[in-house]
Image: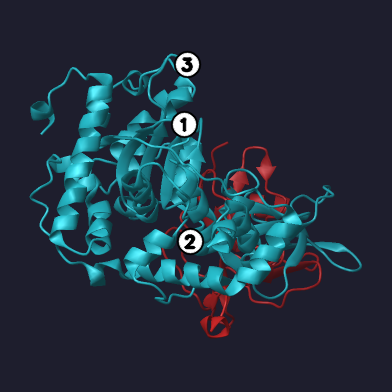
Chain colours: A red, B cyan
Amino acid sequence: MSLEYEQIEPTVLGQISTTNFELLRLVKNGGTLDSRGNKKVGESLFTVRVIKGSWATKLPSGQTMYEVILQVVSSGINNATARKDVIVHKIVEKQTIIKEIEKKPNKTQQTFKTDENVKEKNLFNIEDLE
Amino acid sequence: MKEINEMWHFQNWATLNDKLYGNTLSAENFVDDGRIHHQDNFFNIAKIETFEWSPENGEDRYFVKMVKGNEFFILPKKYLEHLPIEIKGETKKIKLKKSESQVWNYITGVDISKVPMKQYFEFTDTIDIFNPVEHSDDMTWTFLKLMAFTEGIKVAICGDTGCGKNANLTLYRHIRGKVAHKIKNNTRAQLWVQMYYNNQLNFDEWTTWKKEHRNDTEDIIAGVADEDPDIDKFSRDKNRNLLKIKNINNKSFTFTFNPYSDNHHIHFKDTFENFDKIIDRYPILYLEGKVLSTILSPSDERSKQIVFENFNVMCKIIANDAYWKNNLDKHLHNYSRVKSNLNRRHLANLGRLLDVLDVYCFSQEQFDVWLVWIDSRIQAYKDLNSFDYSSERLA
């Protein structure tokens, strides 16, 4: 499966709620996104823009955006795609980048951060040996 | 002295190791040889339901699987360079697949377990009190202890059964960790993992390795001894982009094997596709003599008691070893090495051992005796096997 996109201006196209399938369609029909902008279905809100090149990290609304790399696989879209808080997807064919609105994790899907602060700890105390 | 001897049985050091490292995870805890896995989404086991979650940083989605006792762990790859580690904070109970029943502990923070350093003994005493068994050849036994102490050498040792070729490395495995004292029949990928996590690697009984394993690993073994720090060219396993081995010149690669005999019909030189390459890089020494005394193997209970009674002195030996391992260069006498007949590559590959000998010796005269002795041991192996090459050709 080869996806073709039309060049789209690197501007925010609007908040678009989407299911996996719809997101695939958005990508496939990137050129028609303008006409589908601000569509809202269900609870999943995404601000999507299809770009070629660089993009801004802030939306005009002032919201912070995360980078999301969408994976399109030959058997369909990865199940994890296009849900809340899912950030990185693999790349198979063409790389498409969307940005997700910052939001708090809910109980069904969370992200977490590991501790970057690694300290050395002695196996035993020299002082105790005297 | 009797107590000291009893304390030196490797079982007691293994018991102490368990005690000191009881709360840590090391390369010994890998589930599948330390293979790197990747997964975007995991399944967090909560009180009411299991929900999907994902590490925020992409690098935390690369991990290794580990096991200790009956607990299974997921360790993010970024912590691998710190092994052995102690788990910090709570782990997350997860499943790798929603449908599986295996529970894993995802590690979210670690502390590095570090051996404290302190000099308690002079270096000569450090070596002399180490593993003080009786040996019929004092020079051989001291040399084997010095060799086991040293990191960064490439050498092959031929010795009769009972010579004690591996005894000291076995102790260092429990004292230092990061010592693979008995590598046998490794594939290239397995050897690569051993090289990543250990500083001292000993190919035990090489002449009894299966031919396919010898052939698979020969070019790596030759390559690490050619003074070229870039060995990425040998990294052909699937972890190649994830495990870059640093400072290969500071790692020891040693062979130990028995000589050809009526009961052992394999010549060391016949085990290589290109022996010239090996002999050019690895000096081969024939060591004579046998270990004469035996330390009785303690029971588990007796071993715990010995460790309890000698805990302080054993910890002092460990701290003292860490001191000398890291500060040897400060104590060099810089004795002249002109008496050595080692060729250029052999001199480089035994260089760290000569540094250790330099610090061990009290005088240039004593050091010279050792240089001549090393040459004599190399000649002894040539005589033993009547090599058809001339030392001039390799010089």
Which residue does the numbered mark 3 point to in the structure image?
B263
Q: Are marks 2 and 1 in contact (CB under 8 Å)?
A: no
* Label 2 vs 3, first from the N-terminus: 2
Residue at 18% across / 49% down in the picture? B369
Crowd tier of the residue under label 1, counting other residues whose Cα lies within 10 Å: few below 14, some 14–19, many 20 or above: few
Q: Amino acid at mark 1?
A: Thr
What is the C-alpha distance between the residues marked 2 and 1?
A: 37 Å
Expressed as whole percent of the image width and height from the top left, the position of residue B10 reads 57, 52
CA distance separating discs 3 and 1: 12 Å
Which quadrant of the figure has residue B300? bottom right
- The amino acid sitting under disc 3 is Asn
Q: Nearer the viewer, mark 2 or mark 1?
A: 1
Determine the residue positioned at 10% across, 34% down.
B395
Query: Which residue is under mark 2?
Result: B81
Numbered circle sitting on residue A88? none
Q: Mark 3 or 1 closer to N-term? A: 1
